[in-house]
Image: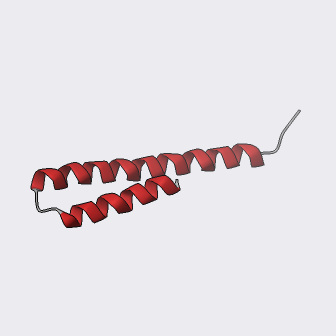
Amino acid sequence: MAAEQKARATYENLIMLTDDPLVKDTLRFLREREIVHFQRFGEGVRLAEEKMNAKKYF
């Protein structure tokens, strides 16, 4: 999950460095994709924790 946060920060920094609207649009798309990845990984971790903490009935 840390990799997604670092990539998002990198894309934000690159967006501030460029004036080209097409490059900015591409970087915004990539940044949004990293945000979605972060959310999906977070959901996966939450589901795994729920599964591990669930009572086991044998």
Q: Residue furthest right?
A: 58
Q: Tell me, what colour scheme is on the image?
A: secondary structure
Q: Nearer the viewer, residue 3 or 43?
A: 3
Out of 45 and 27, give the one closest to the viewer: 27
Image position of 4 (left or right of 19): right
Q: Work out whether residue 50 or residue 4 is closer to the camera in this orientation and state it.
A: 4
Q: Nearer the viewer, residue 32 or 24?
A: 24
- Which residue is the extreme one toward the top? 58
Based on the displayed image, in which of its 4 quarters is residue 48 positioned? top right
Q: In the image, 43: left or right of 24?
A: right
The quarter holding residue 58 reads top right
Q: Quadrant of residue 52?
A: top right
- Residue under the image location 71 percent in, 43 percent down: 51
What residue is drawn where x is 48% and y is 53%?
3
Residue at left 26%, top 49%? 29
Q: Position of residue 11 (x, y in %)?
A: 31, 58
Q: Position of residue 12 (x, y in %)?
A: 30, 63
> How many numbered marks, from 0 up?
0
Say above or below: 1 vs 48. Answer: below
Residue 6 image position (x, y, % from top left): 43, 59
Q: Residue at x 52, y 53 (%)?
A: 1
35 displayed left or right of 48: left
